[in-house]
Image: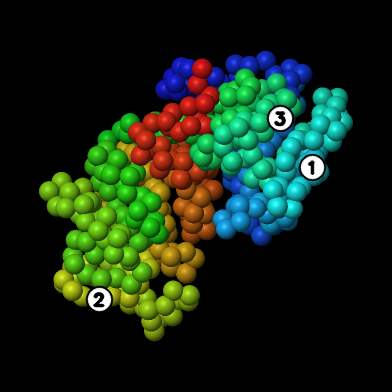
């Protein structure tokens, strides 16, 4: 992997002597729902670093957050099987024939884990250094009282983690919030970027400085969460295709229609983009949409295809839950996806899993682009790509013209910032 476009001030794990060292690694293994792994892609993506640490004589301690653990009303931390790292540890031990162990640290029923107990960690660290264990995997970082607290509490927790290891490696680009495990830990000890982090930064360079022509596809359930990245992308793209509620809000703003599920504030936010595009003409509009009167099931009697060309001001529609697949037969849309030199996709076009035909047709069309670089961002996007076009997904995993980001939110935030080094956890690694 070339590092020519990485910030020269970014320390890299391959430049450190790991022999006999304990290496604390922040990964993004937040893939557990209701005690089960929903998709192991983000775990598998860290195997290279785990192997690298082992073959170079290092001893790994891994940590990640899993789900949301803090009660918004009381501020109390809830720990339990639903947010445990146990499924991840079991998966690692099965896939790698490893022996990772999670320390059983005392948990306050309201405040979570208050401290890294030295009496518990001491014997485990001794076994780790003596190679009696394959590695340690700390409990969910959000079970620790200081993880999201900020200030001195976060610094104290980071110092306790730093006392366990010789080196900190950030391998969790998708975890872009500045918490104790992503930010303060990097300040508390020697720190560097792991292989996956480096790949994510390199991929982002291709989005921030794309080879033209550049087509971006963005969808989402709320316009206000995407307005910043959308405006930044609009400046860079040659063509922009929208989907989901974002597209619905744009259509309401442009054509003066009303669509169920689209809030008035989203329409107002979309109005600026619609006005801007009235002269630039960068946005390509999928011309056929699937309208449904119900959200909880797909009932043919409650669905129909409507045409954008038929819109008239004041018309009211039920829910637009997908882009009809025939929309992508339109020559300009097809060419924008198959002929672009760079395609960035952060989009599920319909309400998954009931309405997926539009996304499937689009992913397949992008797959026909043999010369362009195709970058996919976001867990939902990757899941739908995998479910709707499994054959293409398997092929893409070994195709260098594809890149799958592990964190869609981090990618969009970096796009809005204009640089990934503006994200605090990444900036904390710089010398």
Alpha carbon distance from label 3 to label 2? 58 Å
Which residue is tagged 2? Answer: 316
Which residue is tagged 1? Answer: 105
Instruction: Identify which residue is drawn at 24% across, 65% down.
Output: 252
Q: Earlier in the sequence, mark 1 or mark 2?
A: 1
Instruction: Identify which residue is drawn at 61% across, 47% down.
Output: 30
Residue 154 visible in rendering: yes
Residue 226 is left or right of residue 269, and the answer is: right
Circle 2 crowding by C-alpha within 10 Å: few under 14, some 14–19, many from 20: some
Q: Earlier in the sequence, mark 3 or mark 2?
A: 3
Q: Quadrant for residue 29, please give it.
A: top right
Q: Which is nearer the eye, 388 or 116? A: 116
Which residue is tagged 3? Answer: 160
Instruction: Identify which residue is drawn at 50% across, 43% down.
Output: 407
Residue 221 is left or right of residue 338, and the answer is: right
**Residue 215 screen position, x and y as percent:** 30, 44
């Amino acid at each position: 992997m070339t590092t020519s476009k990485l910030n020269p001030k970014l320390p890299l794990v391959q430049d450190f002597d790991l022999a006999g060292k304990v290496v604390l690694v922040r990964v993004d293994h937040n893939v557990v729902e209701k005690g089960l792994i929903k998709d192991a892609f983000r775990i598998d993506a860290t195997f290279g670093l785990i192997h690298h640490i082992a073959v170079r004589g290092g001893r790994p301690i891994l940590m990640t957050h899993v789900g949301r653990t803090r009660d918004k009303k009381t501020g109390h931390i809830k720990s339990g099987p639903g947010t445990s790292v146990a499924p991840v540890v079991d998966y690692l031990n099965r896939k790698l024939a490893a022996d990772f162990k999670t320390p059983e640290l005392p948990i306050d029923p309201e405040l979570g884990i208050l401290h890294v107990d030295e009496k518990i960690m001491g014997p485990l660290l001794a076994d780790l250094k003596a190679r009696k264990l394959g590695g340690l995997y700390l409990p969910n970082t959000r079970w620790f009282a200081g993880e999201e607290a900020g200030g001195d509490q976060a610094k104290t927790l980071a110092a306790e983690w730093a006392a366990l290891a010789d080196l900190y490696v950030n391998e969790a680009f998708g975890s872009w919030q500045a918490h104790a495990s992503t930010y303060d830990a990097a300040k508390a000890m020697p720190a560097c970027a792991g292989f996956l982090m480096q790949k994510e930064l390199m991929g982002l360079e291709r989005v921030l400085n794309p080879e033209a022509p550049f087509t971006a596809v963005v969808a989402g359930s709320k316009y206000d969460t995407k307005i910043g990245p959308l405006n930044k992308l609009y400046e860079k793209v040659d063509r922009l295709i929208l989907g989901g509620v974002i597209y619905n809000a744009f259509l309401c703003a442009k054509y003066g229609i009303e669509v169920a599920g689209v809030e008035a504030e989203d329409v107002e936010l979309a109005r600026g983009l619609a006005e801007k595009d009235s002269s630039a003409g960068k946005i390509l509009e999928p011309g056929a949409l699937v309208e449904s009167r119900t959200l909880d099931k797909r009932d043919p009697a409650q669905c129909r295809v409507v045409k954008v060309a038929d819109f008239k001001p004041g018309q009211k529609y039920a829910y637009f839950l997908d882009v009809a697949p025939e929309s992508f037969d339109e020559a300009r849309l097809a060419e924008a996806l198959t002929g672009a030199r760079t395609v960035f996709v952060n989009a599920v076009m319909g309400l998954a899993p009931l309405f997926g035909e539009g996304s499937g047709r689009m992913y397949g069309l992008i797959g026909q682009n043999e010369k362009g670089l195709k970058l996919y961002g976001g867990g939902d996007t990757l899941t739908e790509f995998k479910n709707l076009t499994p054959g293409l997904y398997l092929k893409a995993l070994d195709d260098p013209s594809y890149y799958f980001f592990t964190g869609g939110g981090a990618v969009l935030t970096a796009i809005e910032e204009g640089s990934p080094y503006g994200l605090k956890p990444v900036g904390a690694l710089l010398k």
